[in-house]
Amino acid sequence: MATIYEVSKAAGVSLATVSRVMNGNAKVSDRTRQKVVDAMEALGYKPNAIAQSLASNRTNSVGLLVSELHGSYFGDLMSTIELILKKHGKHVIITAGHVDESRETDAIDFLTSRRCDALIVHAEAVTDDYLISLSKTSVPVAVVNRKVNGLEDKCFVADNVDGGYLATKAVLDKGHRNIGYISGPLFKTDASDRLTGHKKALAEAGISFESSLMFEGDYHESSGQEGFASLLAQHPDMTALVCANDEMASGAMTAAREAGFALPEQLSVVGFDNAIFCRYLYPKLTTVSNPVRAMGEMAAHWVLEHVYDIKCPQPVTHIFEPELILRDSLGPAPHA
């Protein structure tokens, strides 16, 4: 089996340079890096991960905590982070917290026990104080989809207030006034922020928020169905429905069609996230883009820059702006 010394000799570089290439260090020219890679391939050299870890005090692994493993939102987040880190020779260890405080802390303990060089966390149940304490340990931490006071330079979050505002403003601009709202679970910051944006748009239009026109869902399709039925029973004159995510909007649309509603002629529906299935629903769903890929990309680049000294190709951004995506599920208010 070839050794690192033979790679060094074949490439015509020092042992330190070979080590830097193996560890993804940015302080190596592309020409020199390629010489080392070519030498390793020619000799069939396979770096020993344990030896690399001992030599560099790095495991070249990053821990990723997400709330769930299913759904397009978390799929986009995980795949984006993994792709970027993999390009730089880093591996991702993924675990889920399932929106439970003890399970989130257990998951983070698991990742730190695996000596991850950094953590990227999408945590919804642990407290801000816990995350602040975690950030003071020796393991760098990036926080996705949550703004923590005092950790603003480590947080990567969408402007959910503006996103909620955009969704409801689009409905108001079409002349709707009897507008139902299905929120996510309001203990989650993104759900409460989107509701705040919804209320802001109503107030701007001179419409008072009515609690009977709001149903608290759980971000799953079934609560969209339940929310539609509950709101319709109290407000049969409802002409539009804004949902805090696309899964609930999909459930609401199914329930509305089953109740005999023509969409959008009798009921307009707007979602949030811009999940891939939105363009395949009937009618195609108007929604607000949730820049989850951009947040994941920037969190990954932050880790590369702060842990591995690999510079980010663009300035680090911490707040990401959502965008209204107009499709067929939003129409003018009946008789507007």
Image (cartoon, helix red, strand yellow):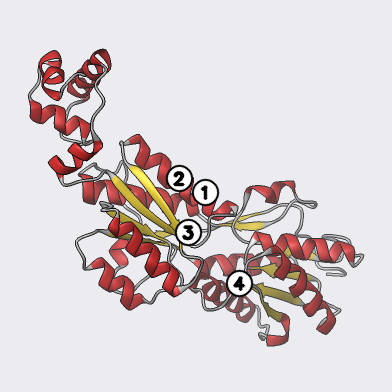
Label 2: element kind: helix
Which residue corresponds to mark 4? 184
Q: Amino acid at mark 4?
A: Gly
Which residue corresponds to mark 3? 321
Q: Amino acid at mark 3?
A: Glu
The reply, left or right, for residue 135 in relation to residue 78 is left
> Viewer-nearest of labels 3 and 4?
4
**Residue at the image point whose x is 15% and y is 34% from the top:** 27
Q: Are the residues at dot 2 and dot 1 in contact (C-beta closer than 8 Å)? A: yes
Label 4: element kind: loop
Q: Residues within 10 Å of mark 2 (few under 14, many from 20)?
A: many
Q: Earlier in the sequence, mark 1 or mark 3?
A: 1
The reply, left or right, for residue 320 in relation to residue 220 is left
Q: Is residue 73 visible?
A: yes
Number of numbered discs visible in the structure rendering: 4
Q: Are the residues at dot 1 and dot 3 in contact (C-beta closer than 8 Å)? A: no
Inter-mark Cα distance, 2 to 4: 24 Å
